[in-house]
Image: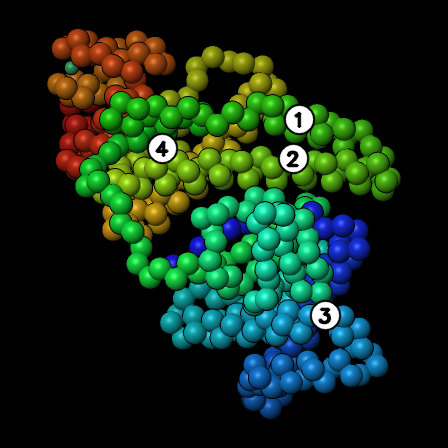
Amino acid sequence: MLKACKIRLYPNSEQKQIIASQIGGSRYIFNRMLALKIFAYKKFGKNISKFELIKYATKLKTRDKTLWLKEIDSQVVQQSISNMDTAYKNFFRRVKQGGAVGFPKFKSKHHSRQSFQYPQRVKLNEKKNKVYLPKVGWVKCKGFRKEFAGKIKTVTVSLEAYQYHASLLTDDGIETISINHNNQSIGLDVGVKLVVADSNGNKVEALKLERELIKLRKRAKQLSCKKKGSKNRFKAKQKLAKINLHIANKRKDFLHKLSLQYSENQTVVVEDLKIKNMSKSAKGTTETPGKNVKAKAGLNRVITQQSWGMFFEMLEYKLKANGGELIKVDPKFTSQTCPKCKYISKENRLSQSKFVCQRCSYANNADIVGALNILDRGIHGNNASLQIAS
Ligand SMILES: [Zn+2]
């Protein structure tokens, strides 16, 4: 089974330079070979094979103008050609299938993420927390986990927001995926904050990001004070990019763990966010805060919505890998319906967190009630309880 693992790299300044030249060389080869392939096809209707391109790249190393390519690891060059060739082939395959069309793009050195790839020969020293990258040498690293030990297939070294990472793709040699689900169905109610309540009565606390968000605001403010084009502005930009990336990674990590936990079920029912967005006022706040607070709350809501969208995607593919499924339902009235007697009323909702049925006195946490109703709707059909609403 293939597994991916991302580790942080801490190259010294000399290694940074070598990495920069590998990135540049890899990009140069990708672009030059893509151009050559397009040219040969347009002019002569000829398809240049991967092996011809690799031969040509070797020749380039002996020419005066491109002698500098000698500095680039030969397998990095081959991998770059291979990646371009695959992107090119995929494009034509997708065209044949009538699918979405994306012609391989030339790589820009202005792109925020720069990378290159090793097909093999990367070694790890777990005890010393070091990774060996050909041409670069032993680089200090952090974040390697034992469960990812195995045969390394490819390693992608990337530079983004002034941070270096290596994404390792390993093969543990085990062919089967272990299915670990419990044949259960569960409903999830996701909140306007990053909180999940489930129909089993559990609540998962939100990811705490207050400290990071305070830092983010501080960094953004610092940036706005710096003179355009100044060195300090560049530094402030670096710092802002760093904290942004950190927050995004933390959020992703949280959602990955959460989706893994719930993917053990056979069926997971969640609300359809698209429908929910159309009737936003249902759960929205009624108070009228100041403009600034409102704008901030709006931004937070957008981020939360995006996060839930990402969470559902992660959940869906993890469920599918386990043979389970994700069902999305219309969330209308799920926060006002009594799960016991199906009575629907705004009055059932005593507060943001308290639910007490005005007909049968059933009481529970309001978010858990939401999750129970979402599960019920997923199992018994989408509009079963909507008719009684008035
Ligand atoms: Zn009731």
Pointer 4 and pointer 2: residues touching (CB < 8 Å)?
Answer: no
Element at label 3? loop
**Nearer the observer, 14 or 63:** 14
Per the rendering, the mark at residue 72 is: 3
Residue 187 at least partly seen: yes
Q: Which of the two discs, 4 and 1, labels the residue nearer the N terminus?
A: 1
Residue at image x 46%, y 58%?
Answer: 150
What residue type is disc 3 on? Ile
Task: Find residue 261 and report its horizontal and vertical position in percent.
Answer: 34, 37
Per the rendering, the mark at residue 276 is: 4
Which quadrant, please, contains the N terminus? bottom left
Task: Find residue 353 and report its horizontal and vertical position in percent.
Answer: 34, 14
Q: Which of the two discs, 3 and 2, labels the residue nearer the N terminus?
A: 3
Per the rendering, the mark at residue 226 is: none
Spatial CA distance of label 3 from label 1 is: 39 Å
Spatial CA distance of label 2 from label 1 is: 8 Å
Pointer 3 and pointer 1: residues touching (CB < 8 Å)?
Answer: no
Per the rendering, the mark at residue 215 is: 1
Spatial CA distance of label 3 from label 4 is: 52 Å
Q: In this view, does 169 lie above or below 71?
A: above
Q: Which of the two discs, 3 and 4, labels the residue nearer the N terminus?
A: 3
Task: Find residue 272 and report its horizontal and vertical position in percent.
Answer: 33, 37
Image quadrant where residue 381 sits? top left
Q: Is residue 315 above or below residue 50?
A: above
- Residue, disc 2: 243
Pointer 2 and pointer 1: residues touching (CB < 8 Å)?
Answer: yes
Task: Find residue 136 and report its horizontal and vertical position in percent.
Answer: 71, 61
Q: Which of the two discs, 3 and 1, labels the residue nearer the N terminus?
A: 3
Are there few (<14), some (14-19), or many (20+) residues within 10 Å of tag 4? Answer: some
Q: In this view, does 354 lie to the left or right of 222?
A: left
